[in-house]
Image (cartoon, grey):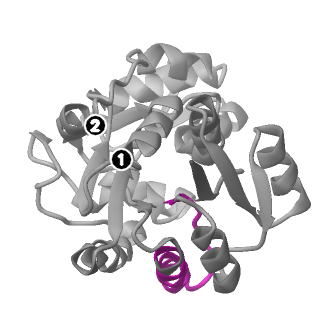
Amino acid sequence: MQIFITGGSGYIGRSTIRALTGHGIAVTALARSERAARIVADLGATPVVGALTDTDVLHEAARGADGVIHLGVDYAEGTADIDRAAAEALQEGVGSGPYVHTGGVWVYGDTDGVVDEDAPLSPPRITAWRLENEKRVLARAAAGEHPVVVMPGLVYGRSGGLAQSFFVEPGRAARAVPNIGDGTNHWALIHVDDIAELYVLALNAPAGSVYAGVGGQNLPLADVTRALSRAAGCPDRIEPLTVEEAVRRMGPIAEAFALDQQFSGALARRELGWTPTRRDALTELAQG
């Protein structure tokens, strides 16, 4: 089996290539730079030179693969349009083969306690564009294609991820880690290696499936920021911010960090046999 992956040189992509090759699956990976090509090659994948805007390249690479995992995102102007065109090229290329598209649980907004994939959608500004694109992706199941959407929670581990970029690194510089609101809101966390395993399993999921990629660790932000303060080298030094202050400092992603989200993740475990094994997020986050 051969899988074509976009975003392979990125944070989640690197772990996903490791997971694929660990299962004996050959990987080709989109690489938009020499550096990206070196990264994916060192992980055992064959680089395919191109960017997400190169839809002809995407189509041909997908046509030569048995399945596709689309992890890449272009955060330049026109993100939604670029993602939609890339998804269409990939799906048309792979045809009836499995196509695994990346979403994110932020599209659900605040949850009322612990919820699953059937919860109502209420995305913050930064992820609102995903809704229409995911609807288009899944609609192709009716034409005999094989789309699946994986929606990661807040991904951590291997000294990377958004918590590292927006909390640990600024906290290290300011000698205090930011905390948004009163810290009682919850983050639905998942280790990067566990979400990578879900991407591999999703290649065999039923067409039209949607999975929340969360590990059952729904932790209060106050506990998370205390752990991150240790990683930043300033234990228990927390800087409280209102949502408005956080948006001015971090941009609109702060609205997503302020969401109160709890998810079960039971569907992927039940249907795919997914078993997240990294269950101590606070300890790992504290280590940086």
Left or right: where 188 falls relative to 282: left
Q: Amino acid at mark 2?
A: Leu
Tell me the SS state at disc 2: helix
| CA separation in Å, label 1 and label 2 | 8 Å
Residue drawn at x 57%, y 44% as measured from the top left:
12
Tell me the SS state at disc 1: loop
Image quarter hosting the C terminus: top right
Residue drawn at x 10%, y 39% as measured from the top left:
113
Decide if residue 237 is in sight here. no
Residue 201 is situated, as x and y percent measured from the top left of the image, at 39, 40
Q: Are marks 1 and 2 in contact (CB under 8 Å)?
A: yes
Camera-nearest residue between 39 and 218 = 39
Q: Amino acid at mark 1?
A: Asn
**Range covered by the magenta-colored residues:** 67-91
Q: Magenta segment: does it hold 112?
A: no
Camera-nearest residue between 100 and 224 = 100
Residue 36 is situated, as x and y percent measured from the top left of the image, at 81, 55
Above or below, 206 relative to 221: below
